[in-house]
Image (cartoon, coloured by chain):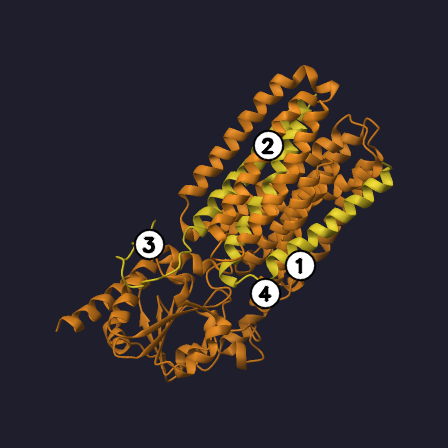
């Protein structure tokens, strides 16, 4: 395939992905804004895959050092993003009986 | 080899599908929990499959492959382990800065990919190099900017740094950085190209710092959300350079979703994004602080509690002060006592209550408050006028009626909760200090308003006791 065609296909991908992102978010209740920001933060952690590819193909010390840093940061993004999002979302539970259970001493310090 | 390439490529397809589907499920409270799990599986899958690449690395990398794989595993364990421990142990109130930190790491990873593409010996075309530079610029800005945002939210950096001609300096740094980036591309095949690349990345990091330091802490959530979108965009661009459609899709989805989220957040604070980024909020406020200096009334916690116990409707307006005092649990205990006494209790959440949109919902959820008791501003604002008592806890600017009436107020036009329209307003507050925007609040001096001074935790404890005492006698 020609370089020009590859480039155009890339633009198509970007355009469709941009619409997808817009659609996915556009009808979100504001209570989910923070978890969703955290969730999308997790999703872009996929950059770790790019960093891994770069590190596997490293052939100089500089590339190895930068690749190592990249993978480390990317892994932090992935795991941190997941854990934080999961913790936030775990708290959204519907109430069938509001006053029944004992008060959780929510004040963790 | 061909088969391996197909497996790697298809894993990316499946992963990006799962990630987008997971994100979609996260956008409704009912399916949200399963959404992150779905996305998590997608991520795990694609990371695992990316290890298949070790069988098809470039010839130059063949002799280093063992070291590279060891480095990769080490980096995954260190980065993932640290972030997992940190993310699990941090308090819920500190979540916004954690999101900033993890987002910055993602930006750094994208920048690292860009560094390798710019300095590596591979024969990359000019078009790809320019995309690399763009991704590197955005990723680096996201890294340094997010770190500044983290420092501000974490209280390590309290004052916005502003000086005369700041905008000109920022613009100059930005232009110089772009020039360096173009030079790095132009000199790519020359021996000196690496130097330009190095200077370019330093400049890009500087851009992120310059852009973030003048912005006040109150605007940080919007800034973090913007950097989240930045990182997504950078990941998408680096995905193009790496010829990896999964990165392109996931990155661009986050880029556009994050941009929309940023706009929604800014709208909630009645500010435009340019306003957040380029104007210095709070500078013109000094003049307006001197208003009519009436004395605010104050009542004891038990009196206020008694009034609420015998009211028929109560709306609670929680703010960040509640979270700082770690009093959400105590508050819910009090609410349950009121409910047991037949009072209709609702929570009213301003879109930017807490430090981020939805942050207060998370904090209340942590205390066990069911989310169907919690109402958004638009759904509840008309009910205040028919409400016996509005209880404002640790919130200030979001109930400031000046936003409706006083054109000279810096927060004029910001949508607020109409707590002042309730028949009686109680405000739990530590003192008469001003809110985050440093604007005086006339609500406190209204005739239907009384202050309950004290730490939210202590005041609510007294209220709980007072109500218990009433039902015992």
Residue sitting farthest toward the top = B63
Label 4: which secondary element: loop
Q: Residue at (68%, 45%) from the top-left corner? A: B249
The chain to which mark 4 is attached is B
The chain assigned the colour orange in the figure is B
Q: Residues within 10 Å of mark 1 (few under 14, many from 20)?
A: few
Q: Nearer the viewer, residue B451 or A89?
A: A89
- Whether marks 4 and 2 lie on the same chain: no
Q: Nearer the viewer, residue B295 or B191?
A: B191
The percent coordinates of residue A94 (x first, y second) are 39, 59
- Nearest-to-viewer mark from 3 and 4: 3
Q: Residue at (48%, 80%) from the top-left corner? A: B291
> In this figure, which residue is indicated by the disc labeled 1?
B164
Disc 4, disc 2: CB below 8 Å? no
- Nearest-to-viewer mark from 4 and 2: 2
> In this figure, which residue is indicated by the disc labeled 2?
A71
Image quadrant assignment for residue A69: top right
Counting residues from the N terminus, which is met first, the one under dot 2 or under dot 3?
2
Which disc number belongs to residue A106?
3
- Whether marks 3 and 4 lie on the same chain: no
The chain to which mark 1 is attached is B
The percent coordinates of residue B23 (x first, y second) are 57, 50
* CA separation in Å, label 1 and label 3: 45 Å
Residue B163 seen = no
Q: Residues within 10 Å of mark 3 (few under 14, many from 20)?
A: many
Disc 1, disc 2: CB below 8 Å? no
């Amino acid at each position: 395939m020609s370089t020009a065609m590859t480039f155009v296909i890339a633009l198509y991908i970007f355009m469709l992905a941009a619409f997808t992102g817009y659609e996915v978010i556009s009808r979100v209740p504001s209570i989910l804004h923070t978890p969703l920001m955290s969730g999308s933060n997790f999703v872009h952690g996929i950059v770790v895959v790019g960093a891994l590819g770069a590190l596997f193909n490293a052939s100089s010390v500089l590339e190895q050092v930068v690749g190592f840093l990249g993978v480390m940061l990317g892994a932090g993004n992935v795991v941190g993003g997941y854990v934080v999002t999961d913790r936030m979302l775990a708290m959204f539970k519907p109430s069938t009986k509001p006053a029944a259970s004992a008060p959780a001493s929510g004040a963790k310090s | 080899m061909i088969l391996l390439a197909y497996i790697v490529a298809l894993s990316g397809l499946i992963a990006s599908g799962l990630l987008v589907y997971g994100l979609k499920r996260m956008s409704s409270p009912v399916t949200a929990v399963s959404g992150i799990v779905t996305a998590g599986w997608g991520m795990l899958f694609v990371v695992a499959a990316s290890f298949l690449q070790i069988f098809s690395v470039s010839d130059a990398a063949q002799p280093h492959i063992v070291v590279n794989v060891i480095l990769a595993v080490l980096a995954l364990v260190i980065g993932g382990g640290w972030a997992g421990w940190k993310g699990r142990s941090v308090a819920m109130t500190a979540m916004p800065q954690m999101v900033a930190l993890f987002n910055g790491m993602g930006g750094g990873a994208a920048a690292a990919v860009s560094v390798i593409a710019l300095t590596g010996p591979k024969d990359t075309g000019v078009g790809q190099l320019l995309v690399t530079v763009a991704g590197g610029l955005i990723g680096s800005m996201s890294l340094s900017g997010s770190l500044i945002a983290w420092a501000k939210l974490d209280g390590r950096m309290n004052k916005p740094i502003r000086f005369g001609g700041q905008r000109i300096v920022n613009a100059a740094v930005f232009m110089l950085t772009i020039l360096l980036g173009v030079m790095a591309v132009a000199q790519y095949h020359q021996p000196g190209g690496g130097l330009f690349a190095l200077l370019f990345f330093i400049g890009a990091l500087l851009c992120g710092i310059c852009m973030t330091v003048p912005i006040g802490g109150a605007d940080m959530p919007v800034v973090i959300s913007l950097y989240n979108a930045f990182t997504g965009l950078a990941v998408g661009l680096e995905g193009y350079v790496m010829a990896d459609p999964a990165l392109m899709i996931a990155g661009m989805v986050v880029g556009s979703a994050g941009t929309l989220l940023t706009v929604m957040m800014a709208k909630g604070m009645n500010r435009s994004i340019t306003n957040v980024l380029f104007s210095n909020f709070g500078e013109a406020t000094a003049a307006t602080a001197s208003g009519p200096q009436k004395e605010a009334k104050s009542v004891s916690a038990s009196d206020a509690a008694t009034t609420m116990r015998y009211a028929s409707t109560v709306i609670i307006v929680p703010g960040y002060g509640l979270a700082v005092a770690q009093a959400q649990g105590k508050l819910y205990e009090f609410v349950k006592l009121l409910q047991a006494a037949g009072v209709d209790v609702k929570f009213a959440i301003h879109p930017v209550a807490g430090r981020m949109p939805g942050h207060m919902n998370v904090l209340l959820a942590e205390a066990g408050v069911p989310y169907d008791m919690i109402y958004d501003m638009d759904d509840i604002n008309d009910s205040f006028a028919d409400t016996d008592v509005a209880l404002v806890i640790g919130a200030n600017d979001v109930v400031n009626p000046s936003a409706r009436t006083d054109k000279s107020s810096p927060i004029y036009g910001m949508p607020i909760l109409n707590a002042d329209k309730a028949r009686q307003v109680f405000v739990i507050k530590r003192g008469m200090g001003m809110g985050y925007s440093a604007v005086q609040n006339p609500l406190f001096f209204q005739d239907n308003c009384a202050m309950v001074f004290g730490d939210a935790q202590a005041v609510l404890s007294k209220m709980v006791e007072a109500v218990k005492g009433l039902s015992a006698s």
